[in-house]
Image (cartoon, rainbow, N blue to C red):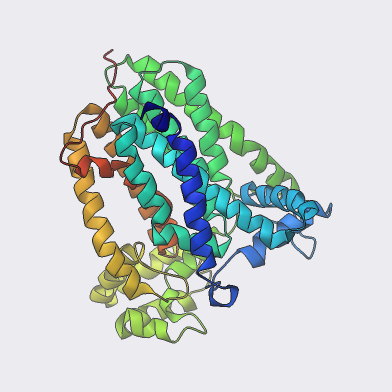
Amino acid sequence: MHHVIRRAPFLVFLCAIVVTCVFQAMFPRDARDRQGSDYASYYHPTANSLLAGGGYSTPIGSVQTRIPPGYPLLLAAAQLLGRPAGIGDEGAVRLLMVLSMGLGAVVIFLIARMIWGPRSALIPSVLWMTCPFTQFLTLQLNSDVPFMPSYYATVGLFLHAILNGAASPLVFFLTGLLAGVVMLFRPIAIGLGGVLAVLLGVALKGRPGHLRVILAAWILFGNAVAVLPWEAWLYAKTGRFILLSDAGSSTLREGWMFGVRTGQPEGRRIVGEDVGDLMREFASAENGGSPKTILQVLARETRRRPAAVVKLVYLKLARCWYGTDSLRFEPLILLVQSLYLPLLLYAGWRSWRSGIAGRLATLCIGSQIACFWGMAFLVIPLLRYMTPVEGLAFVLLPAVLPQSRQVASVPRS
């Protein structure tokens, strides 16, 4: 049995690969929902430009500022390795999706093993690899799936350091460095380094204040080391300061008018006539992607129709957990979430009561959920923005078991 437990990460990796391959085989190419996919519009052309020697640019030769460089660089590497093998660009990216699912399942297992032990850790990894929301992302070929292993590794390294009472700057520098890499994959993680730095101060509250400040500074320094070269390159090429990417204004605007987009008449039926009329105010506003403009419209419309504003805010908060860009499958997603979300809430409550390690894990994961939820609310409220952090919450599920007990302990200062 001990021999099997030692090989558990490898077995989890293989199982996740098999599950992903079976899931992808169930959906022929013409049945896959590609609406809203950035792969064909941005990621694949940018990777092709890199491989063709055109640099980090769009198909027309301008600097690519719409997307950060993490996924295009990884995609270019996958295509470069896949072409000699004869699998083509799409075959290479699908293989990347499969391997990323395997790595993501392993990291989920390792994080859960730190807290609950190897046997209980199998539960979160199996549920993560079989989660339909996670698997559907592998069909889109976007950055979401490769983002998850590196994101989980960042949180896992941080938790490992905290649970083992680490005081070495190196581990926290590496945490910040990984957080920066994660930000370069998906801007939704923009505050990850800062959140982890604050959490460190809370988790190590028994340590001297100056030590907590120093270790938090190492996280932020590692974060800056990863991100600043990209920021400097962008400024040198464009003469503008662009925070990770310049897609923010358009996604901010779309986040307040997703129910009245051209070509989706069903959107108005979903949001209702009153919210639809309110969304048209955002759609018609000049410079509608500006935060100042959004706040001005909100202030004006709150005085005119407060009920519609409240309904829109509630709708954006709720749709973060079930919304799709194509507005398809949402009733089915709501049904599945009615099972997942209460279970995860209960697991968080049990984990919080299980001991100091479970409490720290719950605090860390809860803060991540709050950050991702807030970011998804600000832009287009979509489930795919919440899927990575919902998957991370699976780590807490062993707390639900009647005989569950944490195996990690936090060294006393």
Q: Quadrant of the C terminus?
A: top left
Q: Is residue 402 above or below residue 212?
A: below
* Left or right, 333 with reference to 402: right
| 288 or 96, nearer to the observer | 96
- Find residue 291 and report its horizontal and vertical position in percent: 46, 60
* Left or right, 7 with reference to 199: right
Q: Residue at x 61, y 52 (%)?
A: 96
| 163 or 176, nearer to the observer | 163
Q: Quadrant of residue 260?
A: bottom left
* Left or right, 402 with reference to 207: left
Q: Is residue 145 visible?
A: yes
- Find residue 359 and report its horizontal and vertical position in percent: 24, 33
- Find residue 118 and report its horizontal and vertical position in percent: 34, 33
| 255 or 186, nearer to the observer | 186
Q: Residue at x 27, y 17 (%)?
A: 206
- Find residue 28 and report its horizontal and vertical position in percent: 56, 73
Q: Is residue 172 above or below residue 40?
A: above
| 1 or 7, nearer to the observer | 1
Farthest-out residue, right? 53
Q: Residue at x 44, y 21 (%)?
A: 215
Q: Residue at x 34, y 38 (%)?
A: 121
Q: Is residue 366 above or below residue 110?
A: below
Q: Is residue 378 visible?
A: no
Q: Quadrant of the N terminus?
A: top left
User: How many numbered discs?
Assistant: 0
